[in-house]
């Protein structure tokens, strides 16, 4: 089956076999443009030439008791990052104003830690209420760690539209990355989010010494979870973390991964997230042929590309900013 036939198969409601998925990740470099064209065919059917913009604010940095090997904020990290307790409401609300200035449709409120304590949740709830009062059309995404059902309900009632909790890697590879919580803990939080009525966001980090089969399992697991938004991060190995020095990626493979996620999750938001600048490098624009969403501004502990460069990239591609991030209009469905 050619890549173009794969696209037609997916658009007809079909799913890739494991062998077909593997052929995407093992696409010969000289066929990469054919693969990108096929993935774009699927992306265009559901999202046209629109790109969703997201901005993140790190409301609490470091001080995390978890032992995630990729994270500079982890208790096992020796990375020299800034550490601070939960921001005040006014600071979080001011971040939303900045997001509005940058025309980011989604504002992501992130805090380090295993999960929010009551005081932290109170600050987020009050912040979201004020942001929603000031910016009624802004989509609010929260990312606060492992949630209890009643916490998810509080966030929903406050006006949180989306909640991010990444699976990060495959179930089989999970213990190689962290042992302070289980893969099931992450899946359970996503399920609580869905039960509360909040749109689920869950994604991955590519490049953490996983196999290609692990990558395929990640994409299929997110399909099973029915995540509305899928951030695809590419490891930016920070000195001082257990994964320091890991450098298994190249821009061409990153593009193949994005194409795979588009084929397996055709109707979902695929967001190129952390590490795109250092891993995709000069091929960043090509990533938006399979993906339809990016972060603008900085990430949690690493710097992002200048927002002007991102806007220039979109303009050069002939793409436009999607001002309806939650895709509230009914999207096309399979026949």
Image (tube, rainbow, N blue to C red):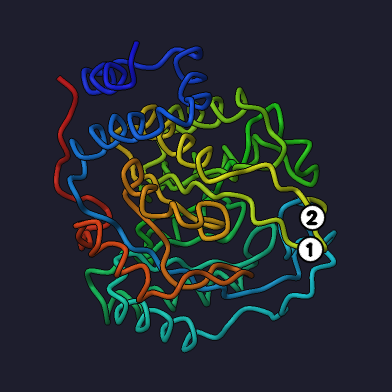
How far apart are the two marked residues, 1 and 2, measured between alpha carbons?
5 Å
Secondary element under disc 1, as helix, strand or loop, is: loop
* Left or right placement of residue 105 versus residue 260 in this view: left
Reading the image, the residue beneath label 2 is 244
> In what quadrant of the picture does the N terminus appear?
top left
Residue at image location 25% in from the left, 32% down from the top: 42
Residue at image location 47% in from the left, 81% down from the top: 92
Using a 10 Å C-alpha cutoff, classify the residue at mark 1 as few (fewer than 14 neighbours), some (14 to 19) or many (20 or more): some
Reading the image, the residue beneath label 1 is 239
> In what quadrant of the picture does the C terminus appear?
top left
Using a 10 Å C-alpha cutoff, classify the residue at mark 2 as few (fewer than 14 neighbours), some (14 to 19) or many (20 or more): some
Above or below, comparing residue 267 to residue 231 in the picture: above
Above or below, comparing residue 77 to residue 221 in the picture: below
* Left or right placement of residue 64 versus residue 263 in this view: right
Residue at image location 61% in from the left, 22% down from the top: 213
Of 279 and 91, which appears nearest the observer?
A: 279
Q: Quadrant of residue 156?
A: bottom left
Residue 86 x/y as whole percent: 62, 78
Residue 239 x/y as whole percent: 79, 63
Q: Of the residues under marks 1 and 2, which one precedes in the sequence?
A: 1
Residue 141 x/y as whole percent: 42, 61
Which mark is drawn over residue 209?
none
Of 47 and 327, which appears nearest the observer?
A: 47
Above or below, comparing residue 110 to residue 24 in the picture: below
Q: Are marks 1 and 2 in contact (CB under 8 Å)?
A: yes
Secondary element under disc 2, as helix, strand or loop, is: loop
* Left or right placement of residue 234 versus residue 103 in this view: right
Figure disc tally:
2
Residue 199 x/y as whole percent: 36, 48
């Amino acid at each position: 089956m050619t890549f173009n036939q794969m696209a037609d198969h997916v658009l007809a409601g079909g799913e890739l076999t494991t062998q077909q998925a593997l052929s995407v990740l093992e696409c010969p470099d000289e066929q990469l443009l054919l693969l990108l064209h096929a993935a774009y065919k699927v992306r265009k059917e559901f999202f046209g030439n629109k790109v969703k913009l997201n901005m993140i604010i790190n409301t609490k940095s470091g001080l995390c008791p978890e032992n995630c090997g990729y994270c500079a904020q982890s208790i096992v990290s020796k990375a020299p990052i800034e550490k601070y307790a939960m921001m005040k409401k006014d600071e979080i609300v001011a971040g939303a104003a900045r997001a509005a200035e940058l025309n980011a449709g989604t504002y992501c409120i992130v805090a380090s830690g295993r999960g929010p304590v009551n005081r932290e949740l109170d600050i987020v709830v009050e912040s979201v209420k004020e942001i929603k009062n000031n910016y009624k059309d802004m989509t609010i995404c929260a990312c606060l760690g492992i949630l209890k059902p009643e916490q998810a309900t509080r966030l929903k009632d406050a006006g949180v539209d989306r909640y991010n909790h990444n699976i990060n890697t495959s179930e089989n590879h999970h213990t190689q990355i962290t042992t302070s919580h289980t893969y099931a803990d992450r899946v359970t939080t996503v399920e609580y989010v869905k039960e509360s009525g909040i749109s689920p966001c869950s994604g991955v980090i590519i490049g953490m010494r996983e196999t290609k089969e692990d990558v395929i399992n990640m994409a299929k697991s997110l399909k099973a979870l029915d995540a509305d938004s899928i951030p695809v991060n590419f490891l930016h190995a920070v000195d001082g973390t257990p994964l320091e020095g890991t450098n298994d990626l190249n821009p061409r493979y990153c593009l193949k991964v994005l194409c795979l996620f588009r084929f397996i999750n055709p109707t979902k938001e695929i967001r190129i997230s952390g590490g795109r600048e250092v891993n995709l490098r000069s091929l960043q624009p090509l990533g938006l042929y399979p993906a339809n969403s990016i972060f603008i501004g900085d990430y949690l502990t690493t710097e992002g590309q200048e927002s002007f460069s991102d806007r220039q990239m979109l303009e050069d591609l002939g793409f436009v900013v999607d001002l309806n991030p939650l895709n509230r209009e009914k999207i096309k469905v399979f026949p």
